[in-house]
Amino acid sequence: MPIDREKATLALDGPVNRVRLVSPARAKALEKLGIRTLRELLTHFPRSYVDLSSVETCASARIGETCTVRGTVHEIKLKKPRYNLKLVEIAVTDGTGILVVTAFRQPWLMDQIKAGDAVAVAGKVIFDYGYKRMTNPFIEVIGEGEGITGAVVPVHPATEKLSAAWVRRIVANGLEEAEGAFDPLPLGLRLRYRLMSRAAALRAIHFPQSMAEVAEARRRLVYEEVLYLELFLMQEGAERSRDAHPTAHTVNGPCVAAFAAQLPFALTGEQERARDEILEGMAAPSAMNHMLLGDVGTGKTVVAGFALAAAADTGGQAMLLAPTEVLARQHAEGLGGLLAQAGVTCALLTGSTPVAERASITERFAAGDVDVLIGTHALLSDDVAPARLTLAVIDEQQRFGVDQRTRLLAKGEAPDALYLTATPIPRTLALALYGNLTLSYIKHRPHDAVSRTTRVLRREQAGEAFDAASAALSRGEQVYVVCPLVGKGAEERDEKAAGKQSDADAAGEEYHPAVAIEDADDFDDDVTAATREAEMLQRNTFPDYVVELLHGGMGTEAKREVMERFRAGEVQVLVATTVIEVGVDVPNATVMIVEDADRFGLAQLHQLRGRVGRGTKAAEVYLLSASTREESLARLAAMETTDDGFELAAFDLSLRREGDILGNRQHGASGLKLVNIMRDGAVIEAAHADAAALLDVDPDLEEPDHRAMAREVRLAFVGEAVGG
Ligand code: ADP
Ligand code: MG
């Protein structure tokens, strides 16, 4: 029977439950992984691969080395050596000897593995209590009919309810379902770069014969991702100014002058230059697309304040979008306060604004009576309809998706856009990624002369950190204690457990916890740990001071109250989860202690330490780590070596992950899954040029050869509903 290509193509965006073996229960588990459609299933790429071609036996596996061992499960049991610690111990035999596998915090393995199963385990071999052992290795039941064709086993991200083996099976069925779907990439481009067909690439990336094949598949898929992104951004840019009348802002009006006059400090030279560059862009009669890059604490907010004042001077309106409630509120109070004194009317709108107040704010905003509306994602909703939006500012833009930016900008007629970010990105890449983007850089913090030191301490040295905290408290300064993320979701535990087997590429980005704590659905354990920590610190360590707790699970009002009291100095020690990660600004806080620092990514640690050293006083950061793993200690040591986020990024590729820069890590835009901003720099630039050339001859991608591609772009970045 001939394959119906049309049908196979449409099936891609049909629900995933059409795929064989996807029961309603599994569909639910897949949804947890963000998979609702067949397309999403097929782009649920393996996070690593285990190369079974280099298998050792229990006898030949060398102590201290990483290898794969295949064998049979002799015995599997669940142990509880301590309250709240569960581990699964598995004895694997292969006729030459025995290997003892210990898997921490993955009790579900008990349901997935039973005695007699054939398994492959991969990890570092150690020798302890008389046995060769592996701790938290990659472990997989090797069964029949899973689609594994070569000596390479893909490891797909999995959940407690859906093991990697099951995901693999379902993906294999999904590939069959999509058999024959059209390749949307024009043949000319495929030939020019010698790219695999999409079908071949998908098959190869999920079930490769060799690691070389993975690289080829990746090359094709990355090019495709980036090309669609470029097409999307360029079309969006053109759309934004088509038939629209961008605003040429007045940039030397009374509000700008009043705002400048009452700043409590003088701008640094770099801030002045950034301000001038932004105002110049706003004065021009075209839609500005400007990014202000500056490391954490370099004073980007106040620079953005000038832009907001200029919008008011022009008789326009502005919106300032921030990723968290704490940050939006801080902007409303700090920046909003300064603007108000300069004659600019500001208002704050967040998800927790009471209904009646919200109605009154949106009404005033729609009537043009509010100049600057500051807020969180709430700003994106339809009832927020400005009368004349001429400027949109996005703070911490890496936290937002491409689609969210589009939604914000659509609220005005070709408004100017200003993005603030602390994520380092080389200029050439920024230009390739954003097209007509202009950039300003701030490299130094305003109080650069003030020192901020970072030290990594082992658990037993923690006393030094708490002594430093006590000293600071007795000088009247304040302290942050950041608590570990013990209660990560199963997915991440899983990820961590398999971290050691990641392919070489992933080595630098091995563990990068999701940052959106406020969105996380499971942080009960975090909260318990943080609560206990706060109690302990209050009772034993800082009995003479007020210790308070701040975490993402608290109600808005409670969070606000704690932050306010900390800001006012009524609370001296703030025990917090990563809710304080972005933006929070309390200059009198000078010491930060991060517990279990090895559980955080470097980017996150750098954001965290940016909370201290913001005033005129020297700051100290202590990173406590119980880890003995050399890689994680070496990673932390980079934090000691440099205090500069841009330099730090040179150490650590994970700091430059595409999601950080493109801002699609966790929201909407599902079109980018593989591209890596550093490694794929050349691809990005090529795709940029190709996209420009394509749009030159066919601006709406209407030629027959381009239509499939146009559809893909829409699907990837605009996000169309799942078909029935
Ligand atoms: P970020 O760039 O991380 O958003 P902020 O805008 O929050 O940094 O600024 C960090 C701190 O530095 C704030 O307390 C701010 O008031 C202060 N600040 C900004 N510019 C200056 C300056 N020129 N002189 C002194 N302090 C400044
Ligand atoms: Mg900021």
Image (spheres, rainbow, N blue to C red):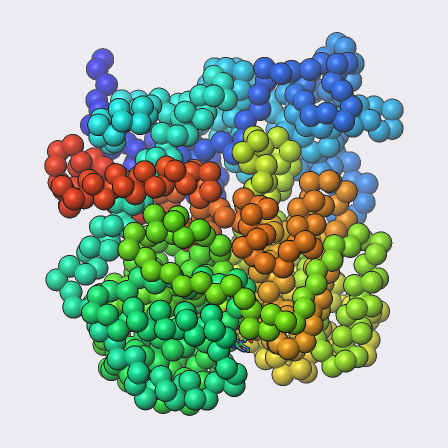
Among all residues in the image, which is located at the extreme top? 95
Question: Is residue 521 left or right of 257 when viewed as pictured?
Answer: right
* Image location of residue 227, percent across then percent down: 30, 40
Among all residues in the image, which is located at the extreme front? 269
Question: Is residue 55 left or right of 421 when viewed as pictured?
Answer: right
Residue sitting at 41 percent across and 85 percent down? 259
Q: Is residue 626 above or below residue 345?
A: above
Residue sitting at 70 percent across and 60 percent down? 454
Question: Is residue 259 left or right of 330 when viewed as pictured?
Answer: left
Q: Would residue 441 be seen by someone viewing this image from the given angle? A: yes
The image quadrant where one finds the N terminus is top left
Q: Is residue 274 above or below residue 640?
A: below
Q: Nearer the viewer, residue 515 or 353?
A: 515
* Image location of residue 396, percent across then percent down: 46, 62
Q: Quadrant location of residue 544?
A: bottom right
Q: Would residue 76 be seen by someone viewing this image from the given angle? A: no
Q: Nearer the viewer, residue 173 or 628?
A: 628
Residue sitting at 75 percent across and 14 percent down? 60
The image quadrant where one finds the C terminus is top left
* Image location of residue 471, percent across then percent down: 80, 74
